[in-house]
Image: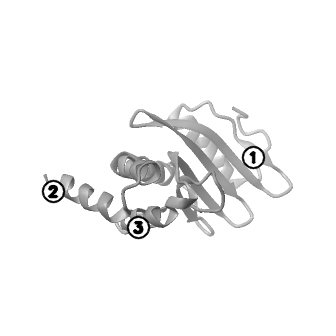
Amino acid sequence: MNDGVGYNDMRITTRLQDWLRIQEWEDEIEVDEERKNSIVSTNMVVDGQTHRLYLEVDEELDMFELYMYGIASVPISRTSEAAIILNRINSRLALGRLTCTGDDETNPIQYKSAIDVEESDLSPKQITNMLDIATHAFINYGFILSQVALTKQSGDEIWSAFLAEEDQ
């Protein structure tokens, strides 16, 4: 890790570095000094599957963002069915949202959460809570997210089966 070199004027990045140290992660923080942005790009195993994780800081906008990408990508032909599932899952999430952009052939399912820390401070607990919610979103819904991406079942069929299993 960079141990704070170059972070003195980067308030939020310093907090991210503190969190990495507390978690004993050895990932490097990449800094774009001109734009006052920083990012940690890493992999994280969730429920036995490797997910891509990005922790981003925008010092000028006082924003901290967390992105986690699931293992499945949604084919363009399945984006309307995925939207059904994503909307229903998002209505259950306490923080953040799941999305699939539908912009190209590599439509990964993405969890995103952001926090504005203008006139406040980013705490390690806030980062941990954001990561925990992202992790639990993929633990709780990863199977049906993969189903909508990889099968021909309708979103309504997948959701109905999920609810039936949840009631048992």
Location of mark 3 (residue): 84
Looking at the image, residue 164 sits to the left or right of residue 148; the answer is left
Task: Inspect the image, locate mark 2, and give the three-letter code of the amino acid beneath it.
Answer: Asp
**Structural distance between the alpha carbons of marks 3 and 1:** 42 Å
Tell me the amino acid under the disc marked 1. Answer: Tyr
Of badges 3 and 2, the one in the foreground is 3
Q: Nearer the viewer, mark 3 or mark 1?
A: 3
Q: Circle 2 sits on which residue?
A: 167
Closer to us: 113 or 82: 82
- Furthest toward the right, the residue is 34
Residue 7 image label: 1
Circle 1 SS class: loop
Residue 83 lies, with reference to residue 17, above or below; the image says below
Q: Nearer the viewer, residue 31 or 54?
A: 54
Crowd around label 1: few <14 · some 14–19 · many ≥20 (10 Å): some
Marks 2 and 1, how far apart at CA: 50 Å
Q: Are marks 3 and 1 in contact (CB under 8 Å)?
A: no
Mark 3: secondary structure? helix
Residue 67, position in %: x, y?
Answer: 57, 52
The residue drawn where x is 68% and y is 50% is 13
* Nearest to the observer: residue 85 or residue 118: 85
